[in-house]
Image (cartoon, rainbow, N blue to C red):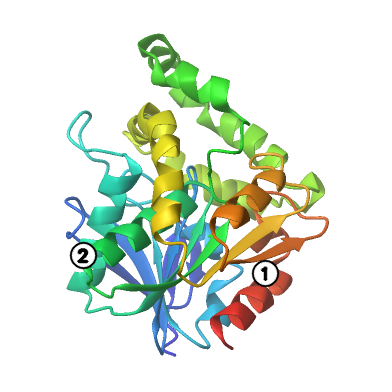
């Protein structure tokens, strides 16, 4: 692959190419590296391409890897308030348009947490339209209707009073990030200052809170639609990958997903929380590549 120093976040660098696309309606930043068939990485709610920093190099030995910053988060453009739909289906549709503009066909997709929901809708829409953009899925601790954690919080922030509180809290988003990371790692001692700095960097960009509020506005409505989407993609090759100590989307819900995806594989990594690609990257990378055929 081509090694080029690219800013992963201000002051830090990683190989690959930094690119920008307008196919999602607003400028979307993404990193592209490696060679071979396409592999698209879709991050979680407060993540961005930085989330995959410990996976990109190994995955790019086998794939042309596309690690995106969804519009509204990371270093992508912040859409104007009220001018962008953040439901799973709308996000998935825009990503499929972008993939088509890149000439991708038969791409494997890894989606984590909220990004897992996006990945399922991408596969569902692609299958219904017969475009052949999406092949195998890796769903990492994906949101699903059988996980009840955080339901009350998302309902509160979806309410106008909750949204007002969130906007007032914007200057202190770093505190929310710290609480979130500590709850998502099985062993918080593994959280480095580099990790904190990386996740903090885009939070100061104006409009980030609107993205988060846009997501939670559709959260419960989307969860109600996920099971139907799963039924329609039940024949796809899918890996469900979880950490045994996940407190954000408990592993028990993965077993419920597998019942509805009878052709899927389920792998549970011991001693790992909600972010297995960060906490146990070598085991995560090996598991994913074995499933994908490498």
Residue under pointer 2 = 129
Q: Give the numbered dot on residue 284.
A: 1
What is the distance, in whole Å, between disc 2 and disc 1 at their CAs?
A: 32 Å
* Residue 147 percent location from the top left of the image: 61, 37
* Residue 278 percent location from the top left of the image: 66, 60
Measuring 39% from the left and 86% from the top, which residue is drawn there? 37
Judging from the image, what secondary structure is the residue with disc 1 in? helix
Task: Please indicate, yes or no, whether residue 32 appears anywhere in the rendered image.
Answer: yes
In the picture, residue 283 is in which quadrant? bottom right
Q: Nearer the viewer, residue 23 or 192?
A: 23
The N terminus appears in which quarter of the rendering? bottom left
Q: Residue 193 vs residue 68: left or right? A: right
Q: Nearer the viewer, residue 70 or 146?
A: 146
Q: Give the numbered dot on residue 77.
A: none
Residue lying furthest top in this view? 161
In the picture, residue 104 is in which quadrant? bottom left
Question: How busy is the neighbourhood of tag 1: few (under 14 within 10 Å), some, or many (20 plus)?
Answer: many
Measuring 17% from the left and 34% from the top, which residue is drawn there? 83
For the residues labelled 2 and 1, say whether their Cβ atoms are less than 8 Å apart: no
Q: Nearer the viewer, residue 276 or 4?
A: 276
Q: Is residue 281 above or below residue 79?
A: below
Q: Residue 97 vs residue 30: left or right? A: left
Task: Please indicate, yes or no, whether residue 20 appears anywhere in the rendered image.
Answer: no
Label located before the other in sequence (2 or 1): 2
* Residue 39 percent location from the top left of the image: 42, 75
């Amino acid at each position: 692959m081509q090694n080029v120093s690219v800013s992963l976040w201000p002051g830090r660098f990683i190989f690959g190419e930094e690119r920008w696309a307008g196919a999602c309606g607003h400028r979307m930043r993404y990193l592209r590296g490696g060679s071979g068939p396409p592999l698209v990485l879709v991050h979680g709610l407060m993540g961005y391409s930085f989330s995959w920093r410990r996976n990109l190099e190994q995955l790019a030995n086998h794939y042309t890897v596309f690690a995106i910053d969804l519009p509204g988060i990371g270093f992508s453009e912040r859409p104007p308030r009220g001018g962008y739909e953040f439901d799973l289906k709308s996000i998935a549709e825009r990503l499929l348009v972008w993939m088509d503009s890149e000439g991708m066909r038969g791409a494997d997709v890894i989606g984590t947490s909220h990004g897992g929901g996006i990945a399922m809708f991408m596969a569902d829409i692609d299958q219904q339209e017969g475009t052949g953009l999406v092949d195998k899925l890796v769903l990492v601790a994906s949101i699903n209707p059988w996980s009840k954690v955080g339901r009350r919080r998302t309902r509160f922030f979806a309410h106008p009073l909750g949204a007002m509180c969130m906007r007032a809290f914007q200057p202190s988003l770093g505190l929310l990030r710290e609480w979130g990371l500590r709850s998502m790692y099985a062993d918080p001692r593994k959280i480095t200052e580099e990790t904190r700095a990386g996740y903090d960097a885009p939070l100061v960009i104006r409009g980030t809170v609107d993205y988060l509020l846009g997501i939670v506005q559709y959260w419960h409505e989307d969860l109600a639609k996920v099971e139907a989407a799963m039924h329609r993609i039940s024949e796809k090759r899918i890996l469900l990958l979880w950490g045994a100590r996940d407190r954000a989307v408990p592993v028990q819900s993965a077993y419920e997903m597998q019942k509805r995806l009878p052709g899927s594989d389920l792998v549970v990594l011991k001693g790992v929380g909600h972010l297995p690609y960060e906490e146990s990257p070598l085991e995560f990378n090996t598991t994913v590549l074995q499933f994908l055929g490498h």
